[in-house]
Image (spheres, rainbow, N blue to C red):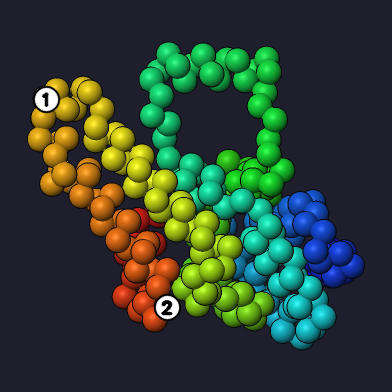
């Protein structure tokens, strides 16, 4: 536990600095020795949860640290790119990867997806993260009092970026549906009633309603999560 308390002390000394090494250190502490051992990771998260419940000072500062990152970093690339295959052709993708070997792109420090890749740096991290039950994660977030995205006002920066991400994904779907190769075979795809066009109209309508005061978001949580996942 000494390693964990040291990490929490460092975070508490500069909670608004957005030092990625501190978050990386916290995830390193949670990470199990074997990636498939989600039970060990859940046990570590439980220990963290208990410690935060016993120490309001660490709890408050870890919450400030995490919320500062979420509100100051750009969410767009994280929500629209991670886990989605590139639409580039085989040779274009190959040329890009070879060029990156000689001249790697400079990562944008304000991009949250860069931080996620830095923190969850092992290819096997997805195994234990997804293996930990939702109840364990929810208990931690409740202790930290991290608000649900659906309780935030429409003007909140996170909500705005969330809706921007939905719009970008919708536009990408529409673009795919209007590719010449598809339209040549199915000319009706260019009509307003085509599924590729109509989904974009539906998304535009959804975003406009979401931003209105009094919009009931409770029935939309499952739909939005499914769209983004």
Disc nearest the viewer among 2 and 1: 2
Occupied quadrant, residue 214: bottom left
Nearer to me, 49 or 80: 80
Where residue 200 sits: x, y (%)?
28, 49
User: Which residue is tagged 2?
Assistant: 213
| Residue that numbered label 1 is attached to | 185
Residue 23, compared with residue 170, is above or below; it is below
Q: Reply above or below: 40 against 190.
A: below
Q: Is residue 132 visible?
A: no
Please provide percent x and percent y for residue 18.
77, 57
Residue 137 falls in image quadrant: bottom right
Q: Earlier in the sequence, mark 2 or mark 1?
A: 1
In the picture, the quarter occupied by the N terminus is bottom right
Q: Residue at x 51, y 64 (%)?
A: 159
Q: Where does the image place residue 201, in percent across and percent down from the top left? A: 26, 53
Question: From the viewer's perspective, is 38 left or right of 15?
Answer: left
Q: Is residue 118 left or right of residue 92?
A: right
């Amino acid at each position: 536990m000494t390693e964990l308390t040291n990490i929490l002390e460092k975070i508490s000394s500069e909670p608004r600095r957005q030092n990625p090494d501190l978050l990386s250190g916290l995830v390193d502490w949670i990470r199990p020795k074997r990636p498939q051992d989600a039970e060990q990771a859940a046990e570590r998260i439980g220990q963290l949860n208990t410690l935060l419940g016993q120490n309001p000072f660490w709890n408050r500062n870890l919450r400030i640290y995490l919320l500062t990152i979420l509100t100051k970093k750009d969410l767009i690339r994280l929500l629209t790119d991670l886990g989605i295959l590139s639409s580039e052709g085989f040779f274009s993708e190959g040329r890009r990867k070879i060029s990156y070997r000689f001249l790697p792109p400079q990562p944008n420090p304000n991009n949250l997806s860069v931080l996620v890749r830095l923190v969850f740096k092992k290819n096997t991290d997805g195994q234990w993260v997804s293996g930990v039950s939702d109840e364990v994660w929810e208990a931690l977030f409740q202790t930290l009092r991290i608000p649900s995205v659906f309780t935030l006002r429409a003007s909140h920066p996170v909500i705005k970026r969330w809706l921007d991400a939905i719009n970008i994904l919708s536009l990408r779907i529409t673009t795919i549906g209007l590719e010449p190769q598809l339209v040549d075979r199915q000319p009706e795809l260019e009509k307003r009633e085509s599924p590729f066009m109509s989904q974009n109209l539906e998304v535009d309508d959804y975003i406009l309603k979401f931003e209105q005061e009094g919009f009931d978001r409770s029935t939309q949580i499952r739909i939005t999560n499914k769209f983004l996942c």
